[in-house]
Image (cartoon, rainbow, N blue to C red):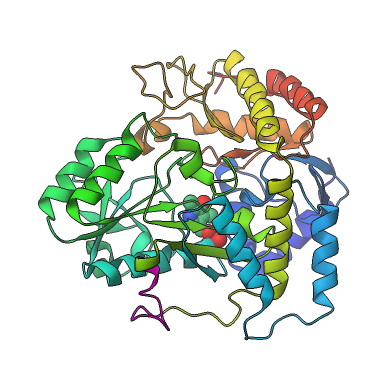
Amino acid sequence: MQSKLSEQLFQKAQQLIPGGVNSPVRAFRAVGRNPFFVERAQGPWLIDEDGNRYLDYVCSWGPGILGHAHPKVIEAVQRVCEKGLTFGAPTAGEVELAELIQACVPEMEMVRLVSSGTEAVMSAVRVARGFTGREKIIKFAGNYHGHSDGLLVKAGSGLMTQSVPDSAGVPAGYAASTLTAVYNDEESVRRLMEENHGQVAAVVVEPVAANMGVVPPKKGFLEFLRRITGDEGALLIFDEVITGFRLALGGATEYTGVSADLHTFGKIVGGGMPLAAYGGRRDIMSCVAPLGAVYQAGTLSGNPVAVTAGITTLKILMEDTGIYERLDRRAAKLAEAYRREGLTVNRAGSLLSAFFAPGWDGDADRLGSREEGGCGIENYEDACKCDKQAFADYFSRMLEHDIYVAPSQFEAMFVSDAHTDELIEMTCGAVRACVRQGET
Ligand SMILES: *Cc1c(COP(=O)(O)O)cnc(C)c1O
């Protein structure tokens, strides 16, 4: 594998850009390597500056459900570019995209377009606070909601009620209004609700967690969140930046059957461009300016080029009635290959994680608790028990087989529609060769 040009670029990048990258995980630090620089991508393939070709299971961290550079999306974007790149005034495309989102997720009675997932969740939380007149929110350890101050919070050691910032530069005061519960642990939520009675504006959750590796909700967990938020007068926010249009056309709501008051979307909804969305109940969204008192704005919000990429992508997903079944079948095949090597595999549709965590039988493709034979890894603490060195070694071996999986144990594997049965078969062979446990 050649890496001369990527190495040169990385040396120069490190002088100019913190860590040489514009988003930390790209630096490959968790696997102890230097990153490759991408020159272009096509379908399931990434081609780096040195001409190496990788089968890509990162898919830009989620947007690439159709594979890279889908001809219809590229053509639509090229066509719309000729009309101008940004106007700062309303366009027909924004109305069409809002309509399509609502057609997929009927609970999205009103939609606001923004430019990143971070912005979508930050705004949804602000709306929840404005609507309820309350300040506190509950989030879950190991769930990621972007890098806004109030959401970069983890639980203090042991005491779940004492939250501390997850990053330098976040005022302790911000963290104080963010309470952290344990994913899949109803009691931890109940306790926080009791201790903060009448003060919780919202519970924000990844309905299928995918930022601590994939961790599906245990049976009844989301239903419990729906119930307790309703009883407490708090809102339920589904952060569907990954799950939206991924688990099903209707996202987590369709996949799990549980509804939320507000949803956030990103990644797929932008079709590979910087676009995200939040929305939900009409009465709640009516709080957003200029209708209501919650301020939220964006110079490039609803950008016509990004909107076109989103519209084209959603239309392809809506017209292809077999796509989710295909994705599911292929991801199941991959999951099986990892399981045969003794890893613990969590999967929900085309999202999966193979955890280097021996000791659980991990025989579950479904939502359910460990006791029910469900996923062996149910929360952040479980995920942290994985053998990270064994993962790093496996990552490097996969790369030598020209397969690019996420450079961290805590990221999901994304299967796209461009990953054909033959490519999945090839990957299963590489898994057999590359997964070695207990060596390190
Ligand atoms: C990626 C992600 C975000 C943040 O989105 P950005 O576009 O990176 O700001 C928020 N929530 C979830 C669940 C995500 O996976």
Relative depth, front residue between 352 and 9: 352
Give the percent coordinates (x, y) of residue 274.
Answer: 63, 66
What residue lies at 66% left-to-right and 79% top-to-bottom?
A: 91
Query: Would you say the magenta stretch is mainly helix, strand or loop?
Result: loop
What residue lies at 74% left-to-right and 39% top-to-bottom?
A: 417
Q: Which quarter of the figure has residue 224?
A: top left
Of the 4 image quadrants, the one containing the C terminus is: top right
Residue stretch in magenta:
284-295
Q: Is residue 191 magenta?
A: no
Can residue 48 be seen by looking at this rendering? no
In the shown orientation, is residue 372 left or right of residue 393? Answer: left
Relative depth, front residue between 351 and 254: 254
Give the percent coordinates (x, y) of residue 391.
Answer: 57, 31
Relative depth, front residue between 354 and 401: 354
In the shown orientation, is residue 219 left or right of residue 66? Answer: left
- Tell me: residue 178, above or below residue 86: above
What residue lies at 69% left-to-right and 51% top-to-bottom?
A: 35
Give the percent coordinates (x, y) of residue 352.
Answer: 57, 33
Give the percent coordinates (x, y) of residue 267.
Answer: 60, 55
Count of numbered labels shown in the rendering: 0
What residue lies at 69% left-to-right and 39% top-to-bottom?
A: 57
Can residue 363 be seen by looking at this rendering? yes
- Tell me: residue 180, above or below residue 378: below
Q: Which quarter of the figure has residue 368?
A: top left
In the shown orientation, is residue 169 left or right of residue 339? Answer: left
Of the 4 image quadrants, the one containing the N terminus is: top right
